[in-house]
């Protein structure tokens, strides 16, 4: 009944010219009268923000517009994507190589946008993979994955991929303590023997290329999340952890015993100095480092074999433990860099640590013993205060520019706005349901763009039309420009939306890549004109150098292929116009289709198994004559004498009378 | 026409609700302009006087510039031959003698601004009817299009 009334209110508003400022709070989420206007982006108009929302166990990264919640693109990162050919075509397969071999999927978690001077700079977005520990870098010009680096000596790269305030480093962590190096040993001997790595990956400021600068060899606790210091705390990085009990089974109970776990405060600038002075040691490891080359349109995978390991005892004064109640998830640093918020997910209070107090405590040696040689700072000596009873199950906090924090509460399904200095709750709003992370564009920076907040929910239950046992994951958009948070919109997301990064559209939209210039195409198998197209046999390999343009392939009749051959279609899109990709699909291909951007070259492998004449075609509707964009490959029997022949309109392609 | 008027009226009615969308109303009422263009197009035009629609309004041709021809030939080969041959109809028309059929401005505008040409220019519209495939925009610069034009001048 209530919901019908709410619906009527909305309906009345839609037809009335002059809506009354209603604020009919209903159990469905307290939509005020003008919420629809606030998220309405008229046809042809642009959204104000990009939101890069983690695709969770889909392994990808989804791009949405805010405030509309419209999905623009799913960027393939850690998982194969047959829609685009990513991870299936020869050029992108190396991107998914790891020390375990080809891994076709991933579990992406926490995107973070590169920064300069503590503010978003819109160059790259990074995202971590939890399962087979990796970090990817995605270009914000091409919206494509340019680099994936595997993290050795780690398992469960969860506390990642956050960047320092000048993008000096992106970090990786270890959620599952493991034997380092890996070895055959009893699981029950976890305690004291399993270890964890906190990895600092240097970012090249020109190319964006990542290289592991060093790994801290930490006790085998479960490192959960992390955030960089900024402003006064720049040079430090903070990592939350649970399972300081070092349990190896039934962690649900056994890792929830200690009253306080820790946030690790890591002074990476100091560690840099130690390394310069020769501290640390090289260890033999094996990890894949995959880079995409935008000139050759091809990825290469290199197996690296060495990493610099730093033990905490090598770097005295660089690592401290801050006691933080009950398995903290988020450890979030406010825009000033002074406050470090521990979101103790089993605690009844939010813990606010002070960077100023931490420095004084270190100077005063106000320690409460140590753990594996790492000094534990006295709780009172570092703690600024606690926010008592704000909600149940705090997970993650972001900030506005007005001194307020916004924290998600998983168990009580709400977002709570509170003042960091006063430690007072200002507002609370239910979410639907079981919220994990939230995101304010620029929320992990000195300068949040604090107009919107996106809450990412784990459970939706009754919020959408049911679609069988699995219902969509969901995000909820709030207006946070006023004193009260206002719920504006629900929108579904792909995979599990762990975390997100947002940025004003105007910071990146104008540099978005439109085409790849044919003259810059350095792909070794590219064809630049139809005259270059050809078919070449090399033993049992047949290489078809093919072009596509609206709306034909060259060549489009190919003969001389035999059963048992391995056929490589090297296909170049000769278009030089925006938004004219062509697709390539071959009947029976066990790879995928390919979606080829203007000026790009991509390669699909096809192994014909039966004699016949087999068609291929363009999958992406390219023109009024798209349906005509098709061709044939004649496949003869193994050992047949059919010669290689390739034509277009019954002539050798590109033959021109001069 | 009547239908369009009703549509426009509707748009006005809808957008007048807020009272702050005057600009949009203007945008939605291009009826007059459309009529004008129809009238313009029915008039007979000598194709050599038809400059087409686009950035090129006036080109003065001098003697054939051989270095420009060579450059134009390269560009033509790289960007145009997927659809055009010189002596033979292909996806698009054969280009032999094109500079005797169309003005230099029209040729360059067809290269630089094909999307508008096939909608607004009578000859281009007829060509689309005949060849079915709309000319692709290969994003040549004006200088590149000029070079291609010079190359075409040698193909008469």
Image (cartoon, rainbow, N blue to C red):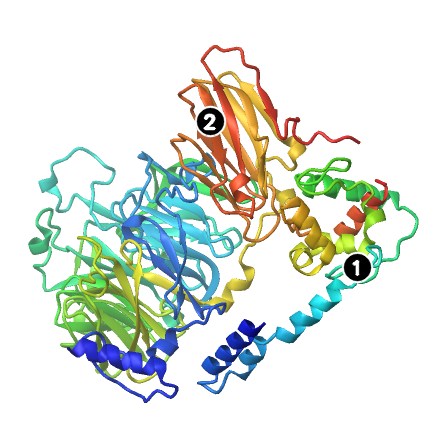
Task: Identify the residue at the far front of this view.
Answer: B2
Q: Where is residue A9 in the image (x, y as percent from the top left)?
A: 26, 82
A383, A239: nearer the viewer? A239
Residue B100 shows in this picture: yes
Q: Position of residue A618 (x, y in %)?
A: 50, 40
A292, A588: nearer the viewer? A588
Q: Which chain carries label 2?
A: A
Position of residue A229 in the picture relative to residue B138 (left or right) = left
Q: Name the residue under label 2.
A: A614
Mark 1, residues whose alpha carbon is within 10 Å: few (<14), some, or many (≥20)? Answer: many
What residue is drawn where x is 80% and y is 40%? B96
Task: Identify the residue at the far right of this view.
Answer: B63
What residue is drawn where x is 78% and y is 64%? B43
Q: In which quarter of the image is the C terminus of chain A?
A: top right
Q: Mark 1 points at which residue?
A: B51
What residue is drawn where x is 15% and y is 55%? A244
């Amino acid at each position: 009944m209530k919901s019908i009334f709410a619906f009527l209110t909305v309906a009345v508003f839609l037809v009335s010219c002059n809506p009354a400022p209603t604020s009919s709070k209903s159990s469905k989420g307290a939509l005020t009268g003008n919420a629809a206007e606030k998220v309405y982006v008229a046809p042809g108009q642009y959204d104000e923000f990009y939101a890069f929302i983690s695709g969770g166990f889909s392994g990808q990264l989804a791009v949405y517009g805010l405030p509309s919640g419209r999905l623009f693109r799913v960027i393939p990162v850690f998982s194969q994507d047959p829609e685009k050919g990513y991870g299936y075509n020869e050029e992108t397969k190396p991107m998914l190589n790891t020390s375990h071999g080809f891994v076709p999927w991933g579990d992406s978690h926490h995107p973070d946008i590169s920064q300069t001077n503590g503010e978003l700079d819109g160059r790259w977005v990074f995202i971590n993979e939890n399962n087979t520990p990796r970090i990817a870098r995605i270009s914000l010009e091409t919206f494509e994955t340019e680099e994936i680096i595997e993290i050795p000596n780690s398992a469960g790269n969860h506390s990642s991929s956050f960047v320092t305030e000048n993008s000096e480093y992106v970090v990786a962590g270890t959620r599952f303590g493991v034997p380092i190096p890996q070895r055959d040993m009893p699981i029950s001997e976890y305690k004291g023997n399993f270890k964890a790595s906190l990895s600092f990956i240097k970012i090249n400021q020109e190319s964006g290329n990542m290289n592991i600068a060093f790994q801290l060899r930490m006790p085998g606790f479960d490192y959960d999340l992390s955030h960089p210091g900024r402003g006064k705390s720049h040079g430090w990085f903070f990592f939350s952890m649970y399972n300081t009990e070092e349990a190896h089974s039934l962690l649900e109970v056994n890792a929830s015993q200690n009253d306080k776990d820790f946030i690790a405060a890591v002074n990476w600038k100091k560690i840099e100095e130690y390394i310069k002075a020769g501290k640390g040691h090289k260890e033999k490891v094996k990890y894949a480092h995959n880079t995409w080359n935008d000139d050759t349109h091809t990825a290469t995978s290199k197996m690296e074999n060495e990493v610099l390991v730093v033990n905490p005892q090598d770097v005295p004064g660089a690592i401290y433990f801050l006691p933080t109640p009950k398995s903290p998830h988020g450890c979030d640093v406010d825009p000033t860099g002074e406050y470090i918020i521990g979101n103790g997910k089993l605690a009844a209070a939010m813990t606010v640590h002070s960077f100023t107090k931490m420095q004084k405590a270190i100077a005063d040696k106000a320690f409460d013993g140590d753990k594996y040689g790492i000094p534990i700072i006295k709780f009172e000596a570092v703690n600024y205060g606690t926010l008592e009873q704000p909600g149940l199950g705090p997970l993650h906090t972001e900030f506005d520019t007005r001194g307020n924090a916004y924290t998600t509460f998983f168990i009580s399904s709400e977002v709570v706005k509170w003042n960091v200095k006063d430690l007072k709750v200002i507002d609370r709003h239910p979410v639907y349901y079981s919220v994990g992370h939230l995101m304010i564009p620029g929320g992990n920076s000195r300068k949040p763009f604090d107009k919107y907040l996106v809450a990412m929910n784990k459970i939706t239950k009754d919020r959408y039309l049911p679609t069988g046992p699995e219902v969509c994951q969901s995000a909820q958009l709030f207006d946070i420009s006023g004193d009260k948070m206002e719920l504006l919109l629900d929108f579904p997301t792909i995979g599990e939306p762990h975390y997100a990064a947002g940025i004003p559209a105007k910071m990146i939209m104008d540099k978005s890549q439109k085409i790849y210039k044919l003259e810059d195409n350095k792909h070794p198998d590219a064809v630049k004109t139809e005259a270059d197209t050809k078919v070449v046999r090399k033993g049992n390999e047949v290489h078809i150098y093919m072009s596509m343009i609206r709306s034909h392939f060259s060549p489009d009749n190919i003969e001389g292929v035999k059963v048992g051959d391995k056929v490589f279609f090297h296909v170049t899109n000769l278009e030089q116009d925006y938004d004219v990709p062509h697709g390539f699909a071959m009947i029976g291909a066990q790879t995928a289709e390919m979606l080829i951007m203007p000026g790009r070259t991509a390669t699909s492998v096809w192994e014909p198994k039966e004699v016949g004449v087999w068609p291929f075609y363009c999958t992406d509707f390219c023109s009024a004559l798209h349906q005509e964009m098709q061709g044939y490959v004649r496949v003869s029997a193994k050992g047949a004498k059919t010669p290689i022949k390739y034509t277009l309109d019954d002539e050798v392609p590109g033959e021109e009378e001069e | 026409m009547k239908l369009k008027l009703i549509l426009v009226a509707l748009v006005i009615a809808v957008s007048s609700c807020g009272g702050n969308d005057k600009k949009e109303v203007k945008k939605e009422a291009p009826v007059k302009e459309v009529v004008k263009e129809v009238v313009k197009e029915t008039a007979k035009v000598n194709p050599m006087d038809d400059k087409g629609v686009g950035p090129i309004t006036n080109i003065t041709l001098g003697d054939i510039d051989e270095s420009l021809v060579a450059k134009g030939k390269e560009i033509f080969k790289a960007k145009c031959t997927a659809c055009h041959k010189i002596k033979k109809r292909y996806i698009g028309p054969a280009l032999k003698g094109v500079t005797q059929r169309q003005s230099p401005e029209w040729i360059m505008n067809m290269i630089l601004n094909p999307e508008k040409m096939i909608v607004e220019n009578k000859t281009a519209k007829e060509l689309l009817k005949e060849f079915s495939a709309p000319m692709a925009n290969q994003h040549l610069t004006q200088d590149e299009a000029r070079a291609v034009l010079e190359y075409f001048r040698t193909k008469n």
